[in-house]
Image (cartoon, rainbow, N blue to C red):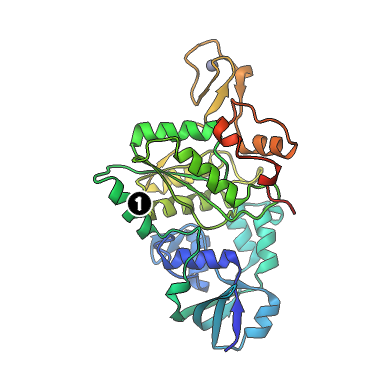
Amino acid sequence: MEKLYINKEQFSDLLNLHYGVFHPLKNFVNEKSFKSILISHKINKKFFPFPIYFGVSEEKYKKYRYKKYLNIYYKKKDIGIIKINNFFKIKNELFGKKLFGINYKKHPYYIKFLKENFAFIDFSYKKLNKKNLNHKNFETPQKFKEKLNKKIKSRKFLAGFHTRNVPHLAHQWIHFFMLKKYKNILIQPLINQYKEDEYKESIIIKTNKAAVNMYDKNKAFFSTYFSFPRYGGPCEAALHAIVRKNYGCTHCWIGRDHAGYKSFFKKYSSQQFCKKNEKKMGINIISEDEPYFCSKCEKIVNKKCSLKNCNKKYKKNVSGTIIRSLIKRKKKINNYLMNKNISTLLNSNSLIKK
Ligand SMILES: [Zn+2]
C-alpha cells in the first residue's frame, strides 16, 4: 500500500480530533462540514467555529487521486490506514473571507493555506495504530483531568489561560486575577510555532512551567495545547475556548485581539464573538480589559488607577511583541515587563530563526 507522509501540523490535528480536544468535531471535515463551519459555524447543528481539514499538495493529489486506501505515516510512525471517500475542493475566497476578513489575500495563514492545500481528503479510518498516537508534548484531556482530579477533590471552577508567549507581567497579572476569582487555573500554552521571531516551543514550555511553579501547586496547573497558531482571530479564539472546555475548564480568558494578526481583526471582535457564543460552547468567557503598567503607581493595572492623577502618559504597554524585539536586539528586559526568574531563561536563541 502507498504511504502518505503527514506533517507535524496534520499530526497534531489528528491527535486532537481523536482524543476529543476539538469535541464536538471528531474527524477532519468533509466538503459539507467544511462549508457549513465556514458559513454558519455549525456541524450537525452544533456550534463549531474553525474547520480542521486534511489537505494535500497538487503533487500528492495527482499521485493519489485514484487510490482507495493509503497508509499514513508521521516520520517513522505508522499511524494507520485510511479509506478515501473522495477528494474535494473549497473555494479559496470563501475560506479566506470568512476567516480572515476582506484583506485575506495578505494574511500569512491564508498564504500558507494556498501553498499547502490543492485539494482535501474526505476519509475514514480503516485502522488506527493507537500506540503511535502520542507525542512527548501532547497530553490527552482525559489524562489531564485524571491528574487534576487527584489534586483537587472538589472544584467549582477551573479558569483556562491560552498563550503562545513567554509569560510577562501582564500575563501574570491575569494569572493572579483568575486565581483570586476562580481558585484554580490551567496555564496551557499553544506550541508548534513556525514563524520567524516567534518563541521556540521548548522556551514557551519551560517559561510557562516556571510561572506555574510560582503559584500554589494545588491550584495552578500546566498542560500544553499541542496545535499551531492559525492567526484566525474570532473563529480561532472560539476554537481555543472549546479546547479549554474539553480540558475541563469552566472559564477561559479571551484577550483583546485574541489569535489576531496585525490589523486583520478589530481589537474586540474575538472577545465579542466568544462572549456571544459562550452558551453554545459551554464555557464562560472572561473578557476583561487588558492589563498594562502604570509607571506612576509602578504596578500593573487594568482599570483606572486608584490615584486619580494617573493619566495616559504613565501608561506603558506590556506586550510579547515589545519583549521579543528586545530579545532580538540583545537588550535587557526591564523588570516592569517580566519577572526576573523568567527573563533570565531567555536569550537571542529563544526565537525561531529562518
Ligand atoms: Zn497609576
Q: Residue furthest left?
A: 154
Quarter of the image where one finds residue 96 = bottom right
- Secondary structure at numbered mark 1: loop
How many numbered discs? Answer: 1
Residue at (29% x, 50% y) in the render: 149
Q: Position of residue 25 (x, y in %)?
A: 43, 65
The one nearer the camera, 158 or 105, is 158
Q: Is residue 69 above or below residue 251?
A: below
Q: Is mark 1 within 8 Å of ligand 1?
A: no
Q: Specify the quadrant that holds the N terminus.
A: bottom right
Q: Position of residue 341 (x, y in %)?
A: 55, 33
Q: From where the camera sits, is residue 288 visible?
A: no
Residue at (67% x, 39% y) in the render: 324
Q: Is residue 162 above or below residue 69?
A: above
The one nearer the camera, 214 or 317, is 214
The one nearer the camera, 135 or 299, is 135
Mark 1 Cα-neighbour bin, 10 Å: few <14, some 14–19, many ≥20: many
Q: From where the camera sits, is residue 59 visible?
A: yes
The residue identified by callout 1 is: 248
Left or right: residue 287 compared with residue 324: left
The kind of residue on which mark 1 rests is Gly
The one nearer the camera, 354 or 121, is 354
Q: Position of residue 242 (x, y in %)?
A: 42, 53
Q: Position of residue 336 (x, y in %)?
A: 59, 25
Q: Specify the quadrant that holds the C terminus.
A: bottom right
Left or right: residue 175 compared with residue 201: left
Quadrant where ligand 1 appears: top right
